[in-house]
Image: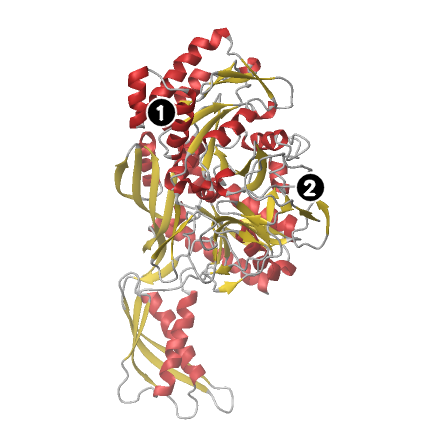
Amino acid sequence: MVVHAHRTVGHPTTTEPIRRRPETFDPSGAQANKEYFVNVYESPFIRNVAFVGHGGTGKTSLVSSALFITGATTRLGSVDDGNAPTDYDDEEIERRMTISTKMAFAEWKKHKINILDTPGFGNMIQDARSAVRVANTAVVVIDCASGVQVQSEKVWEFAEEFSTPRFILVNRVDRERSSFDESLASIQNGFGRTAMPIQIPIGTAADFKGVVDLVRMKAHTYDGDSGNPTEGEIPEELQAQAGEHREKLIELVAESNDTLMEKFFEEGTLSDDELIDGLKQQVAKRAIFPVLYAAGLQSIGVASLLDAIVDFAPDPTHTGVAAGTDAAGSDVERRISNDEPFSAFVFKTISDPFTGRISLFKVYSGSMSDQTQPYNVKRESTERIGHVILMQGKEAVQVPQLNAGDIGAVAKFKDVHTGDTLTDKAAPIIYPAVEMPAPMISFAIEPKSRGDEEKISTAVQKIIEEDPGLHYEREPQTKEFLLSGQGQMHVEVAVARLKKRYGVEVNLHQPKVPYRETIRGKADVQGRHKKQSGGHGQFGDCKIRVEPLPRGSDFEFVDDIFGGSIPKQYIPAVEKGIQEARVKGTLAGFPTVDFRVTLYDGSFHAVDSSEMAFKIAGRLAFRKAMEQAKPVLLEPVMNVVIDTPEEYAGDLMGDLNSRRGRVQGMEMKGSTSVIKAQVPLSEMLSYASDLTSKTGGHGNYTMAFAHYDEVPAQLSDKIIEKAKAEGAGQEEEDE
């Protein structure tokens, strides 16, 4: 069902828009009969906010409360009840956690607030990076009792990476063990003294009932579930504390502005208006990070948060320009203005089995309407727009226009993917995509039934469209299909979606290690194939020398035949026979590499020789040579780089040694230790979960192929024995 929007361009000045909660929307535009009034806002009256933070801090509950208070929804959604507006995916409802970034919007005091609700659990946290990239403010949500946690630090790093201004929202002040002093100490220890309260709570734990606004020195007291505060005087018992923190706030604001600093020295304080203007400027410059307090489940402090977002969060124009490149790679900039040519960045894709692909984007310049024909620079294609829409969780609202700085969506683009830039074809620009980190763990994936073999790749690609942090590939040696992600839960969620959305059931198991075989010695052998069975027989005879080559050389074939002992037309057949045999190996069925074969002599029969006979002779020669050339097993060794707090470095290096790793060195980056090592792949298959356990989630690592190295003899025998047993079992199954 298409839900139409009333067009009011600019800052609404008379009446608040009529709001009715839209029914389920069909973005394809097949039906249209219901109105929903939403203003079209100009850039200065837009706020783009990403709620980020550690998992379980209540981000989704805060968003649900904000939507309810602003009238965007008619009931207060709950994660526990499975009806939170931005946690609507089956897996999210079942696991009671946000798995991927969702969009919602609210209208508050004649401003539009675009809200991005992001995941906070370790395996899913990388999805928050794209949201922080397009947001103009990140609200970092901290649990009052727990303080700054692992993922809080990670999302702070995301905001640093994209130079995103931040609010810090201390949530769950109504919970036991909540403490204003302890939570503030944790925040300032973690994020610095520029994390400064602009509110203090009125009570904590069961006594929490509101906040003191330190800017205007008023108390906002909440009573009941409406989320509407009553403004009044500051309770007497908090006046001294409020005055003390207001003075610290004024000093910090004055420090960052010469004019205000002069005024502060002259008069010893700042007026409310000066404090408001100065605070807004310093938030945009990332010189101050306001700290606020709330209890999302009780809707306490949420209205005050919305007020602060309107008053102090920067609008999209504060950055001035958006930087990109043209098709040739030269630097290009666009002013964030409707007067500039149209450009937009696609930061998220939602893949729905019924609706299809929904592209979420931010308009950086120009404006976008149903009449816009965006050009995809990367894919060199022009798209058509059915409807420009705003996503309200899983629902959508049609809107006639989006101005520069706004966030919206379009369904069923022909060929648009996450990270693409849409522009005016006459003025192309490409905005840099958000790079996702390399996957940390891989699983072999196979369909439960053969009927799903053809469907699995298509379904996985649709899942990856929505979650580019996943990776899917076929390992050429082991022939396994590998699904990789940031952790076991990440991959398991993808598998659950395959089943629920696309009806594809798969099994996961640990991937095979792509071992290889090589030789340490030389051999000089003859391969002779002779068979007589009436009529023409089969005859092929070749002599070869085999010798090892340096690591990484793979295979080299040398034709050293003189005098025609083997006719030229049969020489490729000898090489083909050796190639076929080396792929299957001789020790444990792994490919043989890093050796040279020199074909130097042989004989033939004018009638009985053939390409097939010489291919068989080459195969026999290879097998004989492997018996004499001291074959050994090789394993892949990986370059591993680990980032960890300094206190865990010693234990981790000891753990790497126990994994047969070789530590190459360690360096310090601030308080973070960076360990570099080379470790066999077989020892790293479960490292993601082990590292999380050993560092309490503070450690990260990347891994890339380095080289192949010889497997120690005591391990080699076990690997060979296991491979032969599996090979025998497979042969019985094939029979």
Which residue does the image show at 34% across and 64% down from the upper left?
593
Residue 319 seen in the figure: yes
Foreground of the two, 400 or 684: 400
Foreground of the two, 596 or 402: 402
Quadrant of residue 276 within the rendered picture: top left
Residue 253: mark = 1
The C terminus appears in which quarter of the rendering?
A: bottom right
Asked if residue 693 lies left or right of residue 269, the reply is right
The image position of residue 312, as x and y in percent, is 45, 30
Classed neighbour count for the residue bearing mark 1: other residues with Cα under 10 Å, few (<14), some (14–19), many (≥20): many
Distance CA(mark 1)–CA(mark 2): 43 Å
Asked if residue 561 lies left or right of residue 116, the reply is left
Q: What residue is pinned by disc 2? A: 22
SS for callout 1: helix
Quadrant of residue 77 within the rendered picture: top right
The image position of residue 192, as x and y in percent, is 35, 26
Discs 1/2, front: 1
The colour scheme is: secondary structure
Q: Which amino acid does label 1 sit on?
A: Val
Q: Which amino acid does label 2 sit on?
A: Pro
Foreground of the two, 683 or 722: 683
Query: Which of the marked residues, 1 or 2, is nearer the chain's N terminus?
Result: 2
The image position of residue 699, as x and y in percent, is 38, 36
